Image: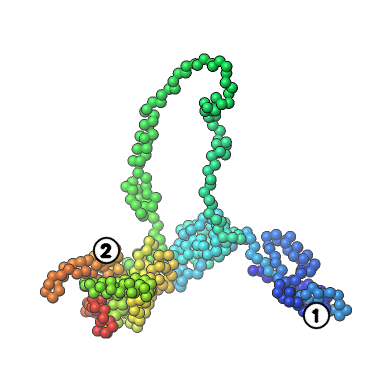
């Protein structure tokens, strides 16, 4: 809102500022002739601006009557103006996080599209996440100042939006097909009048006219009718290159170059840096999942009624990892220069696969959480990841990573460390296998787990003990409560 002050000099009596109850309720007064003239002048000079006079105090018309005791003073009358319609607003790049300096532009709206307040106009893809840019006003996209795919920095002009009163125009209804106007507009040969109509319109002659025999209409040859079918068959056999080569292979033996997005480039760089920096080694173990599966099945309904979400395996593995990290603090540490940094907290990154790449939001202070707290935090982060609303702050930090490839049916794998961490736990699929239990061969649901660690910092002994502690905490969660 733009505010202005209008000074009107009038001679008023001493009791001019006394107000009546009606005036206090309405909080308005009649605009004087001088104010009306200024008001009309503003409307003439700026027809787009809508002015509304608002009084700071209510003055009774009765007190404005003539009086012998008058004095002059300046009375201030304030007025405010609404937003100027059809004014152009420049949309700018929002501020990035401290670790992000630039990003790639991806437009969601085209020139001429209508946008409402808080509707996303474009997205800026950075190294870590996508930043949506909403419109602060209702309007129409007038001009793009940045091309699609271009690199932008914080505070850069992106586009101009012409301000309008309302939000986006309502969806246009499907146009009704009116046969009569279209037939009239399209010239074509006159249709033959039905014989019944002709007989009804023409008078009946006294003597019927002699019938003239007409030759039969020529027959249409069959080959031309079969020609369209042949052309359709030929068209069906033609292979067209896929519209999205990332989703299908049509067999056209063509190649398509697609630019890597910033997130994929950053992931590739970090993975290669991890291989070049760390002396990675992987050790394995297997877990009998019978106990935790029975625990989950027994308490699934009660847990869902109390907390409003299902009990999964990730909470058990994150809690077991935090318990094992407290037992082996070196796995939670990291090398920085010539020093080792030991962290007195457990922040576990959870790998989440998204269409744009692998994200690792962080669950913080897992050592102080129970199963319900972990499940709620994972659910909230997963929902943000699906909406593409993960912030950089949600992925910053992390002292350890858990990756669950079992959701895709993985049997076994060797995960890669997520720098600047020193270890990562890989979960895999649950499959029934024969194992030996007390000298008997039984079928149990088993899962392979893998720990990849930086051998510069973590020795084999600590790695093996770490996996054994996780195995024990999953097969019998009571040891966490007992502190065994």
Q: What is the crowding at mark 2: few (fewer than 14 residues within 10 Å), some, or many (at least 20)? A: few
Name the residue: 23% across, 72% down.
Answer: 289
Question: Residue extending furthest left?
Answer: 439
Nearer to the camera, 195 or 192: 195
* Quadrant of residue 26 within the rendered picture: bottom right
Question: Residue extending furthest front?
Answer: 206
Name the residue: 46% across, 59% down.
Answer: 106
Question: Dot 2 lies on which element?
Answer: loop
Name the residue: 25% across, 73% down.
Answer: 294
Residue 15: image tag:
1
* Quadrant of residue 484 within the rendered picture: bottom left
Q: Distance between the residues labelled 2 and 1?
A: 87 Å
- Does residue 192 show up? no
Name the residue: 43% across, 73% down.
Answer: 393
Check disc 2 and report the residue beneath it: 409
Mark 2 and mark 1 in contact? Answer it, CB < 8 Å.
Answer: no
Nearer to the camera, 240 or 103: 240
The percent coordinates of residue 264 (x first, y second) are 37, 63
Left or right: 214 as drawn, with respect to 65: left
The percent coordinates of residue 316 (x first, y second) are 30, 75
């Amino acid at each position: 809102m733009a505010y202005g002050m209008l000074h009107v000099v009038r001679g008023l009596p001493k009791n001019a500022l006394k107000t009546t109850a009606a005036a206090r309720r309405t909080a308005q007064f009649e605009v004087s002739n001088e104010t009306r003239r200024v008001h009309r002048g503003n409307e003439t000079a700026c027809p787009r601006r809508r002015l509304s006079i608002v009084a700071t105090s209510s003055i009774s018309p009765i007190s404005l009557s003539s009086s012998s005791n008058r004095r002059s003073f300046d009375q201030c009358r304030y007025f405010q103006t609404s937003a100027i319609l059809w004014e152009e607003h420049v949309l700018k790049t929002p501020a990035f996080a401290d670790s992000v300096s630039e990003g790639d532009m991806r437009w969601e709206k085209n020139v001429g599209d209508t946008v409402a307040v808080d509707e996303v106009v474009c997205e800026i893809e950075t190294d870590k996440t996508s930043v949506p840019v909403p419109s602060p006003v209702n309007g129409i996209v007038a001009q793009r100042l940045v091309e699609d795919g271009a690199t932008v920095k914080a505070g850069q002009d992106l586009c101009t939006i012409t301000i309008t009163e309302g939000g986006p125009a309502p969806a246009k209804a499907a146009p009704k097909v009116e046969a009569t106007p279209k037939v009239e507009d399209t010239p074509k040969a006159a249709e033959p009048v039905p014989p019944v109509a002709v007989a009804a319109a023409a008078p009946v002659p006294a003597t019927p006219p002699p019938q003239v025999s007409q030759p039969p209409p020529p027959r249409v040859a069959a080959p031309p009718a079969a020609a369209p079918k042949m052309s359709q068959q030929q068209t069906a056999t033609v292979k067209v290159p896929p519209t999205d080569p990332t989703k299908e292979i049509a067999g056209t033996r063509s190649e398509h170059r697609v630019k890597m997005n910033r997130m994929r480039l950053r992931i590739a760089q970090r993975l290669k840096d991890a291989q070049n920096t760390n002396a990675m080694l992987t050790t394995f173990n297997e877990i009998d999942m019978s106990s935790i599966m029975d625990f989950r099945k027994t308490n699934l309904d009660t847990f869902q009624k109390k907390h409003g979400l299902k009990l999964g395996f990730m909470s058990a593995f994150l809690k077991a990892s935090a318990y094992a990290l407290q037992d082996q603090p070196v796995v939670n540490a990291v090398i920085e220069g010539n020093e080792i940094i030991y962290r007195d907290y457990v922040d576990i990154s959870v790998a989440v696969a998204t269409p744009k790449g692998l994200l690792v939001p962080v669950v913080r202070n897992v050592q102080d959480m129970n199963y319900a707290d972990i499940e709620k935090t994972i659910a909230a982060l997963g929902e943000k990841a699906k909406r593409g609303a993960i912030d950089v702050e949600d992925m910053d930090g992390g002292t350890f990573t858990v990756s669950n490839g079992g959701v895709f049916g993985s049997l076994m794998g060797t995960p890669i460390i997520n720098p600047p961490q020193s270890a990562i736990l890989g979960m895999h699929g649950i499959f029934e296998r024969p194992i030996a239990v007390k000298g008997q061969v039984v079928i149990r649901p088993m899962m392979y787990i893998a720990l990849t660690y930086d051998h510069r910092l973590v020795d084999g002994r600590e790695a093996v003990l770490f996996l054994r502690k996780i195995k024990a905490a999953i097969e019998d969660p009571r040891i966490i409560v007992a502190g065994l």
